[in-house]
Image: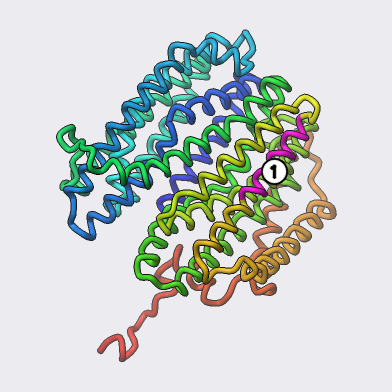
Amino acid sequence: MFGVVARVAQVATRLVTVPIVIAHLGLGGYGIWSIIMTTAAYMRFGSIGIKSAFQKYVAEATGSGDFDTTNKLLSTGCAAMIVLSVLGVIPVALFSTRLAKISGVPPEFLHSAAGAISILAAIMVFSNAGAVYEAVVMGGHRIDLARNFATFFTVAEAIAIIVLLHFGHGLLAMAAVMAASEAGFVFCCYLASKKVVPQVHVRPEFVTRKVARELVRFAGSYQLVNILEVLYLAIVPVTVLRQFGADASGIYAIATRLVLSVLMVPDAFLLPILSGGAMIYGTGSAEQMRVLIQKSFKATLALSLFPLAFLSIFGTTIVFAWTGQADSSFRAALLLVSAAGFFQSFSILSLVLYRVSGRALLDNIRQGLRIVMLLSIAMFARKLGFYGVLTGLAVTELFGMLFMVFALTKTFHSFAAKSLLPDGLRVAAATAFVLAVALTVDRFVPSPPISTGRLLAVFQLTKVCLAVLLSAWPALVMTGSLTRIEGRALISAFLPRVSRPTHPSPERAG
């Protein structure tokens, strides 16, 4: 739940800052900023992957007490990250102007974009090395602390960016704020790690070749899959900017931002699924593992299908109310990016569940094949057009999802993909019912005579959202998408006292 709060804070701040950035820098300026963020993601060198591996090592040490091995794994891994970051980031800083030109940044943004890339390159070396301390805090079962730090710095970063934009600053100042936020987050995690798991030490004397094999096998392969993911995610934005211009890049960036906002809740549960799955897998219970996989897929479907379908239908109204932009390209872009996001959510979930087994081959093969597919599409981007590229992205994500579901069936023999079909049909029926109600209300319930276009769009979204809220629960119950036990579990997650008996039974009292 702290992860959900952190993601909500991140999405909420983006929802506030994006229209302000567009108002000050234009749609093209926001598109350039999204390219800078893509470059920053590359400079992280997939640190999310090695951070997840570090978290697993610390969590295992808290159970086994073998902190000596963990200290060697973390210290050696951190040293490797520093070397990798220095070798990979320094060339980015030195050739930032050329890199911006190659990416297709227009001349009016070239200087500020290059400066922003250089600032982020400098801080990413520090941030990549400091990722080990966030992993220590989370591996020490204090995910709440790491998420609270993230929430605070996300909000502070947004406030600082808004203030700087108000006083006429641009991309360079925004990058400086982001760098300061990264440094503050790492420092807080460093202090917290000393109190949460004081037995863990990241020091030069613990660097050793003895753990290199394990680091390469698990942490290294996890790192590789995330580096490939970063490269994969950079293909479409750079292609769109180079082939179709800054405005098209801005349209794609806004569509992607909305889709990522929708997927924040299912994404927040990936780490708990990884931790819980590792515990179950360790007991050797194939039946419990099958139930976990099935429930995880059902939850992901419920949390992604309806909001993405809603975004595909009412997305243009959302964009207009949010940013004031009314480009006709938004409708098709939102539909195609939503389809890609839907397939991607299941692909990533399958990857996390596959990693529970400790295997590290098929997910890397999936990444390589996706990159080849998307690069092939990028080569013919001019002929395919803007929508053709986005269609290719959706098809590539569909392939990635099917490949990882195949990997799950080969890894966990008790799991069968066809077992997901009944739950899928129920959730799809509930989604169709709720969307039908929303469309009916949107068409037949009149709107007041409001002269301001954006205010009218806000009113339309309000009445549609009210219709969704009123019809969602009945739809879930009628279609059987939500069982009584799941309903109670859902209520107890938010209101634990409601589902808790006021008086203990004689058995419990005894």
Main secondary structure along the magenta-highlighted residues: helix
Check the image and report above or below for 299 versus 508. above
Q: Is residue 411 left or right of residue 313?
A: left
Q: Amino acid at mark 1?
A: Ala
Placement of the C terminus among the 4 image quadrants: bottom left
Is 254 on the left or on the right of 167, as rendered? right
Q: Measured from the top left, where is residue 265 in percent x and y?
A: 52, 52
**Image spot of residue 404 (x, y percent):** 57, 54
State the residue in front, 390 or 31.
Answer: 390
**Residue 70 is one of the magenta-drawn residues:** no
Query: Residue 409, percent across and down?
Result: 56, 63
User: Range of the magenta residues?
Assistant: 386-400
- Residue, disc 1: 394
Q: Is residue 228 left or right of residue 281?
A: right
Quarter of the view holding residue 118: top left
Q: Where 465 falls versus 98 (above or below)?
A: below
Question: Which residue occupies the extreme bottom position in the image?
Answer: 506
Please rate how many residues cluster around mark 1, counting C-alpha atoms within 10 Å: few if below 14, some from 14 to 19, many from 20: many
Q: Quadrant of residue 506?
A: bottom left
